[in-house]
Amino acid sequence: MFQLGKTIVSEDILEKEFVCNLSACKGACCVDGDAGAPLNEEETKILEEIYPIIKPFLRKEGIAAIEAQGTWVNGTDGDLETPLIDNKDCAYVIFDGKTALCGIEQAYNQGLVKWKKPVSCHLYPIRVKDFTEFAAVNYDRWDICSPACSLGKELEVPVYKFVKEALIRKFGQDWYTELEKVADELQQNPPQNRRKPL
């Protein structure tokens, strides 16, 4: 772990490799699990605002779930999340054949909304946990993502490069530039010669 500004960052995001392989996983992260995508308070307001625009992109099951539960919910642990369909699929999920996609992102791709999707989805497999004084930035390992780990290894793409756009969206360009400096230093220095991270 090392400190970067007001974040504590796991070295795993620099050292592990990852590239989403939708043809293999079929977007399973959007339909597996027992909770919706984590949201922050600002994102709940955005969802309320853009719902009428993205609604035509959604499945009838998703629309029914959203209109019954709301555009966002308080999860079992009290955290803000996207609603689920029958405690499985995210309500904003749509399908292209058997592959799960994000209905919000489809509206974004067509230029109808300026918000791509929840930042937690954009960042995955990185998870950010906010604390009072800092945010913890960790690599989240999930069995369903093993094809992404294999593809990342094959293409030699570390996690932090795969989610570059999302990390800049979350923390800003200056933070990412500093992260790249740390990554370069870790790559150049073998473990026994590394200086102790700040």
Image: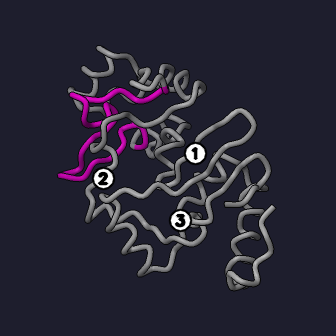
Q: CA distance from mark 2 to mark 3?
A: 18 Å
Question: Which one is nearer the viewer's eye here, 172 or 159?
Answer: 159
Q: Callout 1, which amino acid?
A: Val
User: At numbered mark 1, what does the secondary structure look like: helix, strand or loop?
Assistant: strand
Q: Is residue 113 left or right of residue 96?
A: right
Q: CA distance from mark 1 to mark 3?
A: 14 Å
Residue drawn 72% across and 50% down?
172
Q: Is residue 50 left or right of residue 129?
A: left
Residue drawn 32% across and 59% down?
143
Q: Position of residue 95 (x, y in %)?
A: 24, 45
What range of the chain is rendered magenta? 79-105
In the rendering, which numbered label is found on residue 128?
Answer: 1
Whichever of callouts 2 and 3 sits on the residue coming sooner in the sequence is 2
Residue at the far top: name it.
68
Is residue 198 positioned above or below 71 on the image?
Answer: below
Whether the magenta-drawn stretch holds residue 102 is answered as yes
User: At numbered mark 2, what does the secondary structure look like: helix, strand or loop?
Assistant: loop
Residue that numbered label 3 is attached to: 159
Question: Which one is nearer the viewer's eye here, 71 or 128?
Answer: 128
Q: Position of residue 18 (x, y in %)?
A: 45, 68
Residue that numbered label 2 is attached to: 27
Is residue 174 positioned above or below 102 on the image?
Answer: below
